[in-house]
């Protein structure tokens, strides 16, 4: 999946747990979001894929071969209007929305705090924290109407630590997502709605391939070696896979996951200390 052949241990097992459920996943034509889409499809959900590019959307639908169970709606997560329109479009088309995965994240303009630009700081806030708030707020209404909902915020191991240079804006936003996650879980816990964060360790995705090679070059090492550094910090000595993250998303939306809310679940091979 996601441009990689799944190994046998990563094969998705169809559960049917999500038959009749509708899920929206931001940034899901590729990478982590795409793997979550595949897991939800295997569980029986109808999935609304999204991303900025119609071309990537069309390609994802062709590859998924899920018929009417998967649809694409273009949406840029740096735009409040786009995020809200994605939710509204879904409710209009399917009459419901049960699962909201706020997944798009990332930062640019890497610099130490005293040199970080206003632009990089504000862009990071919009794409990471604000987008998750707008997506959650809009999705809660149909969830409340349906009496059931699952909000999943894709955070990061960097939301549990602050030990890397030049990404204070990323670190800050990921920490803040945890506050939003816990507050949402607290407010809607009695109403059938759970909210959790998944905190992945490093994954070899488009995001990493965009930022990694330059960072590696600056240190005089290859991208592979640079990625390997993340593995060194994991108890498993391996980087995280998209399938491992998707498996936890699947658990959180399953009947077995109904008692899990307000948690910040690490999927990082044992990198974070808590
Ligand atoms: N990769 C890692 O090592 C890692 C580790 C920890 C946490 N995370 C977190 O996991 C989440 C997903 O990361 P990822 O590595 O899977 O990201 P990614 O590789 O950038 O994801 C690519 C997908 O997101 C879409 N996308 C990118 N920017 C978008 C935007 N502004 N609006 C809407 N869609 C957008 C892309 O489609 P378009 O290009 O067509 O928009 C594509 O479908 C992020 O929150 C990230 O912080 C990642």
Image (cartoon, rainbow, N blue to C red):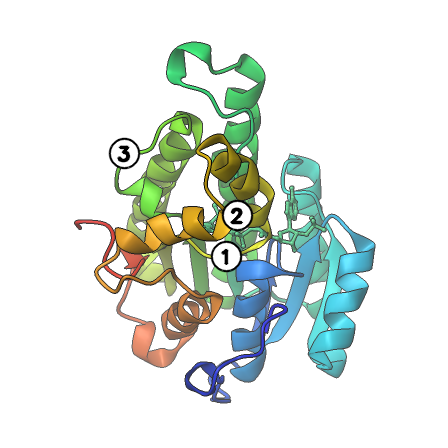
Residue drawn at (70%, 73%) of the image:
70
Q: Earlier in the sequence, mark 3 or mark 1?
A: 3
The answer to whether residue 263 is visible is no
Q: Residue furthest front?
A: 220
**Viewer-proximal residue among 156 and 262:** 156
Real-space Cα distance between discs 3 and 2? 18 Å
Indicate yes or no: mark 3 CB to ligand 1 under 8 Å.
Answer: no
Give residue 60's position: percent from left, percent from top: 72, 68
Q: Secondary structure at mark 1?
A: loop
Residue behind mark 3: 163
Considering only vertical position in the picture, is 159 above or below 108?
below
Q: Is residue 181 left or right of residue 140?
A: left
Other-residue count near label 1 (Cα within 10 Å), few / some / many at <14 / 14–19 / ≥20 = some
> Does the Cβ of the disc 1 residue fall within 8 Å of ligand 1?
yes
**What is the secondary structure assignment of the residue under circle 3?**
loop
Are the residues tagged 1 and 2 within 8 Å (C-beta)? yes
Residue 165's place in the image compared with 231, above or below, is above
Report whether the residue tagged 2 is closer than 8 Å to ligand 1: yes
Instruction: Give how far across and how far down residue 89 sits, in percent.
Output: 73, 56
Q: CA distance from mark 1 to mark 2?
A: 6 Å
Is residue 123 placed above or below 5 in the rendered structure?
A: above
Residue at which label 2 appears: 208
């Amino acid at each position: 999946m996601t441009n990689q052949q799944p190994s046998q241990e990563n094969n998705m097992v169809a559960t049917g747990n999500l038959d009749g459920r509708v899920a929206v996943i931001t940034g899901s034509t590729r990478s982590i979001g795409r793997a979550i889409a595949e897991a939800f499809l295997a569980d029986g959900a109808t999935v609304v894929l999204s991303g900025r590019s119609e071309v990537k959307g069309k390609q994802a639908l062709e590859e998924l071969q899920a018929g009417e169970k998967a649809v694409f709606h273009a949406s840029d997560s740096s735009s409040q209007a786009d995020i809200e329109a994605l939710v509204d479009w879904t409710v209009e088309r399917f009459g419901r929305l049960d699962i909201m995965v706020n997944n798009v994240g990332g930062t640019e303009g890497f610099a130490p705090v005293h040199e970080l630009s206003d632009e990089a700081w504000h862009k990071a806030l919009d794409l990471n924290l604000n987008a998750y708030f707008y997506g959650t707020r809009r999705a809660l209404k149909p969830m409340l109407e349906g009496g059931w909902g699952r909000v999943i915020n894709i955070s990061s191991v960097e939301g549990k630590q602050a030990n890397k240079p030049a990404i204070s804006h990323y670190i800050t936003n990921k920490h803040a997502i945890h506050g939003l996650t816990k507050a949402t879980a607290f407010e809607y816990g009695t109403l059938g709605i759970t909210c959790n964060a998944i905190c992945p360790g490093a994954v070899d995705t488009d995001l990493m391939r965009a930022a990694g090679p330059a960072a590696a070059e600056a240190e005089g090492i290859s991208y592979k070696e640079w990625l390997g550094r993340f593995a060194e910090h994991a108890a498993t000595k391996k980087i995280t896979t998209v399938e491992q993250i998707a498996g936890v998303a699947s658990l959180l939306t399953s009947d077995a996951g109904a008692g899990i809310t307000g948690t910040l679940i690490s999927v990082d091979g044992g990198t974070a200390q808590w």
